[in-house]
Amino acid sequence: MAIIYNTEHRTITLHTGRTTYQMQIDPNGHLLHLYYGARVPDTSLAYLYVLTDCGFSPNSYESRYRRDISLDILPQEYSSCNTGDYRLPALDLSADNGAWGTDLRYVSHDILPGKYHLPGLPASFGSESEAETLSVLLKDEATGTEVTLLYGVFEDADMITRAAMIRNAGSRTIRLEKASSLCLDVPFGQWDLLHFHGRHCMERMPERQRLIHGIQTVSSRRGASSHHQNPFVVLMDHAATETSGVCLGAMLAYSGSHRTDIELDQTGLVRIVSGINEDTFAWELAPGETFSAPEVLLCWTDQGLGDISHHYHRFLLNHMIRSKLVNRCPILINTWEAMMFDFTAERLMHFAQDAAELGIGMLVLDDGWFGNRNSDNSGLGDWTVNTSKLPGGLLEIANGVHALGMKFGLWIEPEMVNEDSDLYRAHPDWALSVPGRKPSMGRNQLVLDMGRCEVVDALFEMLSTLISQNGIDYIKWDMNRNMTDIYSHALPEERQPEASHRYILGVYDLMDRLTTAFPEVLFEGCAGGGGRFDAGMLYYTPQIWCSDDTDAIERLTIQMGTSVGYPIATVGAHVSICPNQQTGRTVPFGTRALTAMSGTFGYELDPAHLTEEEKSQVKGQIERFKKLRELIGTGRYHRLSDFNCEQDVVAWEFSKEDGSQALLNLVVTHPRANGHGSHVKLRGLCSDAVYRIAEAVFEGRQIVLESTSLSETLLEDRRFSGASLMQAGFTLPPLLGDYPSVQLLFERVDEVLECVR
Ligand code: DGJ
């Protein structure tokens, strides 16, 4: 039993394999948070809270003679508003008499087998043997508002999910001003905040800083989870590292404007409140209506950040991504960087032919194939083929590509429209725009009002026809601007603040309908690269294009930042030409491939421009990735160097769960003269097992010192104990030149190592 109610103490305890989470209903009916941390057996941890007179912190009416009991001091499970807790509220609403705030009190709770669902929203799933649900009903008497707090407890996966449903059980309409998914109070500890900021072509840069008193915010108001701040934060104990120490992750499964506030209060308690960004949100709730707030995935460990990553990777792969096609994407070649808008049927077929000869498994026709699309100024919205470029239609191309033994993929951007399109000419009111104001343009396009059913229905019609009639095996779903001029021509004025969230619900609805109708089609998410890389999207698309920056060295940091929360098998990564189109940098071909292999692996170049030497390298890379993809996609991932990639060497590793194989990847970003070589300590091996290097791939020059060269080590067919590789480590000879790299595959051998006694 993962969820236990204790009647004596009125505590509800959730246990996962290694953690315990506990709450308590106090005598006034307030739901207090008692604990989230290492697994403990106690039925009540209320003894942790020593009550003292709390100065300027008010007392509930029932406790007016007890100055030591205040909502402003005690940890809360889902904080109220305007009723004595001055810290971050989880829920704020206004009633039709203008009164605002909430006073939530416990009514009842239920413990149910299996995992709850959230209507219209992505949410993790788990069978009755994998998960249990706790639902706790709270009520605000003054307005009749009922809040159901939902907890999904995954015992084996060591993960707890949170969500909230808010129902108007009163007789008058209320207006939700803020409806958070999570309020989590962390009463004790010394914490750093790790979050992921960035911009287009520089997504998910990890930043770790000490919490200071007051509120720190991680948010987006862009209508997308954004390139700029990812909806994922980790509290790390000051002393926590990759391999040790307490870390607590909170990942919001939502793809729109989000907000996570982290408050360090007067007593040293940290409150995390996370959910839809209230800056661009309000929601009218008529009597009887329910609003669902999206899900947050919580993970606690005392084994460092690497273990947090490991848990999120496993959990997202097993309990969030619905598609069976995760880690199954054929090695693809994408036309974008090679041709942009400039292609013909003939050029495409040559491209496909050249790619097929190299062993590439899928051609993806990117932007430019539809409507009047010869630049990014027109065509979006018209999802029928551009016959001046492709006179025989898409099916002719798909058939040609299939005849070469490859799959055929296609790019779309359904949520957008150009003014210069038949769709916009027919339905100008389908675009978000404020009456009387010229809208802001992004890439000269407008955002469709995805909150309107007729828009979603029309897109479903167009896109399902497109997919079913043209032999499409894969869809790249792009989204190339953020939301402005948020105004829906279908909503009354008082409901305009709903438009932004309704948009995301419409996107989810369309994705749900298309992925359900075409389960054999692999959908890859994209938003100008990684502008919507979040757990919500992964529910529908099992992989996401990680960044429009394809420079392998920039990708090291982008992919490492992404790896903290998201599985490697979901990270869209391609080899592109040099000098790189975004940075002008030249990186060796092998290093580009090694970086792209820590992702879905594909190419973004014209094979006709490759030298014979490069072509033969491509064939080798493809063979190699096919052999390694299971280990890369399902193995345990380890960041061996600093996650900001600020050291001279960037190293990471994949190890098999049973310790039988490990793949070490290393890129030298800053070669040093007279250096000692690069030293790394491997992880995830069996200490007492024996390993050999089964394969080594070098890119770049290496200094071969006679007695210590790696080549010689390999020649000697050396054996290493797992203990040595992990504790003493492994030293590679100095690698010189521009961005050299090494990939080493360690394999366990069935031998006994001679030990020094
Ligand atoms: C942005 C994407 O991230 C690129 O890969 C490419 O598909 C372009 N859009 C096409 O417009």
Image (spheres, rainbow, N blue to C red):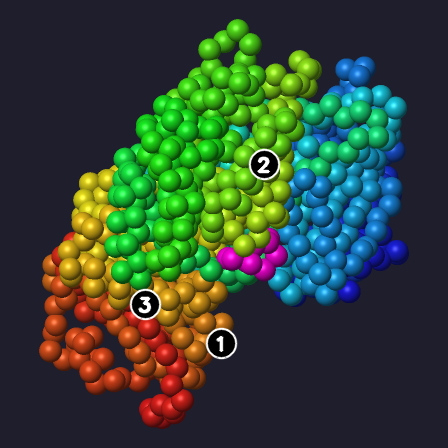
What's the mark number on residue 658?
A: 1
Amino acid type of disc 3?
Arg
* Contact check, label 2 and label 3, Cβ < 8 Å: no
Upstream in sequence: badge 1 or badge 2 = 2
Q: How many other residues sit within 10 Å of disc 2, few (<14), some (14-19) or many (≥20)?
A: some
Numbered disc in front, either 1 or 2: 2
Magenta residues (range)? 316-326
Please tell me which residue lies in front, 288 or 142: 288
**In the depicted view, which residue is nearer to us: 633 or 102?**
633
Q: Amino acid at mark 1?
A: Asp
Give the residue pinned by disc 2: 460
| Residue depicted at x 20% and y 51% | 608
Image quadrant occupied by the N terminus: bottom right
Distance from disc 2 to disc 3, alpha carbons, whole Å, reads 39 Å
Where does the image place residue 86, in percent across and percent down from the top left? 68, 29
Depth order, front residue of 303/360? 360
Question: Where residue 299 appears, x then y in whole percent?
Answer: 59, 54
Q: Is 91 in the magenta?
A: no
> Is residue 141 placed above or below 716 in the rendered structure?
above
Question: Marks 1/3: CA distance?
Answer: 21 Å
Mark 1 → mark 2, Cα distance in angstroms: 44 Å
Residue named by callout 3: 624
Image spot of residue 69 (x, y percent): 78, 38
> Are dots 1 and 3 in contact, CB under 8 Å?
no
Residue 214 seen in the current view: no
Residue 321 is one of the magenta-drawn residues: yes
N-terminal of the pair, mark 1 or mark 3, is 3
Mark identifier at residue 698: none
